[in-house]
Image (cartoon, rainbow, N blue to C red):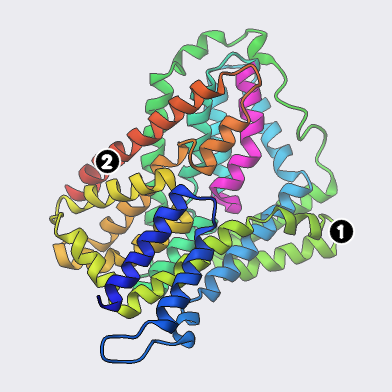
Amino acid sequence: MDLAWITLIALGIVVLASCTTKLNPGVLAIVLAWVVGVYMAEPGGEPLGLRTVVSGFPTDLFLTLTGVTFLFALAQGNGTLERVAAVAVKLCRGNAGLIPLAFFALTFVFASVGAGNIAATALIAPTAMATAHRARISSFLMMIMVGHGAVAGAMSPVAPTGVIAAGIMRDRIGVEGFEWQFYLDNLMANVVIAMVGYLLFGGWKLFRAHSTESSRAEVSPLGEGAFALKHKVTLGVLAGLLVSVIGFDANVGMAAFAGGGILVLGGFSDESDAIKRMPWGVILMVSGVTVLTALLDETGGSELFTNLVAEISGPRSVTGVIAFITGIISVYSSTSGVVLPAFLPIAAGLADQVGASVMAVASSIIVGGHLVDTSPLSTIGALAIASADTSEDRRALFNKGLAWGLSMAVVGAIFCLLYFGLR
């Protein structure tokens, strides 16, 4: 068996392990890349060597993820984001029909401005689920709105997942300039699905409860109080990050580190607390899997994988096929840490082979992988269920969430087939 097959099998083992074990797939990916690259020889040649394996480590991506997550951990740690959330929800003025929409908007905005989908969910879900209980809003409906709101903002060019996708497209296949298109495609898909869920599960009926006491219940003790100087400075730093990145093309990671330095040096947030809050597991996951997928390129495994997918696809059907594959894997695995690093590198080759658009194939990978993330087997769905009131039947909520997440693999495939494949 040649090295291309061996590396492809190694990636399959990583994906399987991410679905069935608690081991961080990034750790396993690095180990397998080391074993394959250093101790297994090319047919008729020498092993690739440690230098080749290590060269696949995504240094730029690592620095960017670290900078962005550090800055938003500082903003979360000093209470700025909680205060923004509390103010936004109070603007609903007791209208129960607006409350789920407000939480969708909140998680979307927080994810989009750089917090990312997981951090936005962790921040908003406890308040959202508590509010749902007090206002007699379906917990499942709130779970859908919070989950898809967070995922809708995930592909922002300044959010961690958007950074990951842009880095992979730029560094692995030499394609740039699609960042905003990816963001808008993913946003549209999640807005459509969230609004369908809102209508299906009684959101429109909540407008009848406009003036009830239950819908006027206090949101949460989190974030109560006036904005202090540290909160205002933090908001200014976040605004500065967006302006510098969007308006002046500044490197998002370096700009985030600069903003974080301002907050720490000024005494506006605690550095040690922020470092503890950072999602180191996700950063390790993305970096490790990227090392293995870089080796996959080196050995010809990416071309082999592309050929396998192309055999069951055509120029019109490829978007639906790849969205379904990534959706099913993402239900049980990490979208940003496993699915995007594993599948985005083959987008250009697959598109060329079947005669489709690179953007359409890449967007289908992104949309298909993200739509299922409200599943309780994913971090976003799990955070929502964990935040549900103690009186809630969490097993029933889990089952509903799992059914919704699995159905999104099919819905995502149909959406991508119609929107990308036939346009």
Residue 196: image quadrant is top left
Instruction: Count neighbours of disc 2 (C-alpha within 10 A) and say few if under 14, some if 14 to 19, many if 20 or more.
Output: many
In the rendered image, the vertical position of residue 40 relative to residue 405, given as above or below? below
Q: Does the magenta stretch include residue 117?
A: yes
Compared to residue 127, the image places residue 62 above or below, namely below
- The spot of residue 394 in percent (x, y) is 56, 23
- List x then y, in percent, for residue 99: 57, 23
Query: Circle 1: is it few (<14), some (14-19), or many (20+) Cα within 10 Å?
Result: few
Residue 187 visible (yes or no): no
Which residue is the extreme one toward the bottom? Answer: 45
N-term mark: 1 or 2 = 1
Q: Can residue 253 be seen in this view?
A: yes
* Residue located at (37% from left, 33% from top): 193
Question: What secondary structure is the magenta-colored segment mainly?
Answer: helix
Tell me the number on the disc at residue 415: 2
The residue range painted magenta reads 112-133
Q: Nearer the viewer, residue 225 or 272?
A: 272
Secondary structure beneath disc 1? loop
64 drawn magenta: no
Residue 170 image label: none
In the shown orientation, is residue 72 left or right of residue 78? left
Q: Nearer the viewer, mark 1 or mark 2?
A: 2
Q: Which residue is drawn at 34% across and 80% down?
A: 298
Q: Which amino acid does label 2 sit on?
A: Phe
Relative image position of residue 81 (x, y in whole percent): 70, 43
Q: Mark 1 sits on what residue?
A: 267
Instruction: Decide which of 228, 69 is in the foreground and name it.
Output: 69
Residue drawn at point x = 73 percent, y = 62 percent? 260
Is 238 in front, or is 51?
51
Residue located farthest toward the right when viewing the structure as drawn: 267
Residue at 44% over, 25% down: 400
User: What's under tag 1, amino acid-wise?
Assistant: Gly
